[in-house]
Image (tube, grey):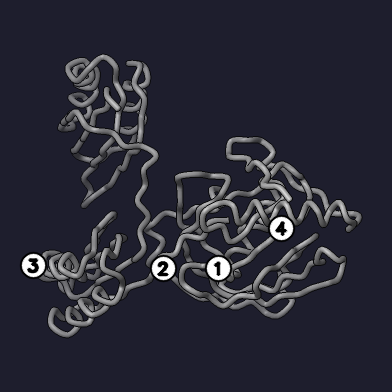
Amino acid sequence: MKDWFMVTLVGRDRPGIVARVTRALFEGGCMLGETAMMRLGGNFSIMMMVRCGAGRRDLEAMLRPEAESLDLRLHVDAIDARLHDHPQPDARITVYGADRPGIVAQVTGALAEAGFNILDLESDVGGTPEAPIYVLHMEGQAQEGLAPLRSALETLRREAGVEASLTPVEALIG
Amino acid sequence: MAVLPILTYPDPRLKQVSEPVREIDEDLRAFVRDLEETMHAGPGGVGIAAPQVGRLLRVAIVDCSRTRKPVPNHGRMVLINPEITRWEGMAVGREGCLSVPDYTGNVIRAEAVRVEALNEHGEPVAYDCEGFEARAVQHELDHLDGLLFLDRLVSRRHDLFRRKVYKKPGER
């Protein structure tokens, strides 16, 4: 599919950003595909699949005034859009522990080696400023089955000082 | 026997409340056979409800005996005018629907339910279901009230907060 772009906006969060940006896109004749907005540490960020027949230059020009008035950084990339193509996760993995540098690299490295393809990842820092905890939550596909993932998590529990659990995901179709 | 066409959202019939079955006769039994064949014709379907084929009747079938990974189940359950009479626990699980292609989402359901109904011979039946099968029963019974799993989606961020809530027997 052509005419699709990935629009990324990042900046300080404030009320009304999504409404203003999507209004500008709608009035400019664009259509949205999949989108994800996240508020990370008080920062606004959104990624939007946007279909725009007018092309990248016009799309940027359309969004520039809104981005500037909202003090957001704007980034537009042409993409290959694959809608109606959702790979299904078959495992959900949660890892948490006392925060320290390197948890994500260590955990995802071990899981990648055990055949885990991450489809979705989010993490949070909770606890107190003095004793922060890190919570990592993933969904993905176990390309070599669940057994190697379970044993990788067992090793991480033992060697990385984190709690780690795996829940199989079996989508019910009814 | 025939595989019936499955309605897909946004067909408005999927959002309507179905009528109770008044008479369980040979016509209804023939319809149940078609409904079952339709359920098995789709990939991986573990349940189906009459409104999914455009018959606004309180009839559902659940059969979790053929899942990829075996789960506790009662085999094929034909549920006519079904009622859930007991709920226990809560769990998040992933659901999709024959009537909502190419989309799955997380839904909170009771972990265990008791469902009472009539079978296709008009006999009263009661099943105590747990886990995946309990989820399937709740998913199909929702169809009879015009509800899709889309009406019950929870954010993926809710996955972390699993908890159990126990109800007193008979509480609804």
Is label 4 on the same chain as label 2? yes
Residue lying at the far bottom in this picture: please name it: A158
Of circles 4 and 2, the one toward us is 4
- In three-dimensional space, the C-alpha distance between marks 4 and 2, rounded to whole angstroms, equals 31 Å
Q: Kindly state the secondary structure of the residue where label 1 is placed.
A: loop
Tell me the amino acid under the disc marked 2.
Phe
Tell me the amino acid under the disc marked 1.
Arg
Name the subunit of mark 1.
B
Badge 3: how crowded within 10 Å, few (<14), some, or many (20+)? few
* Along the viewing direction, whichever of A73 and B131 lies nearer the viewer: B131
To which quarter of the image does residue A131 belong? Answer: bottom left
Q: Earlier in the sequence, mark 2 or mark 1?
A: 1
Q: Identify the residue at image location x=60%, y=69%.
A: B134
Q: Kindly state the secondary structure of the residue where label 2 is placed.
A: loop
Residue B60's disc is 4
Badge 4: how crowded within 10 Å, few (<14), some, or many (20+)? many
Count the marks: how many? 4
Of circles 4 and 1, the one toward us is 1
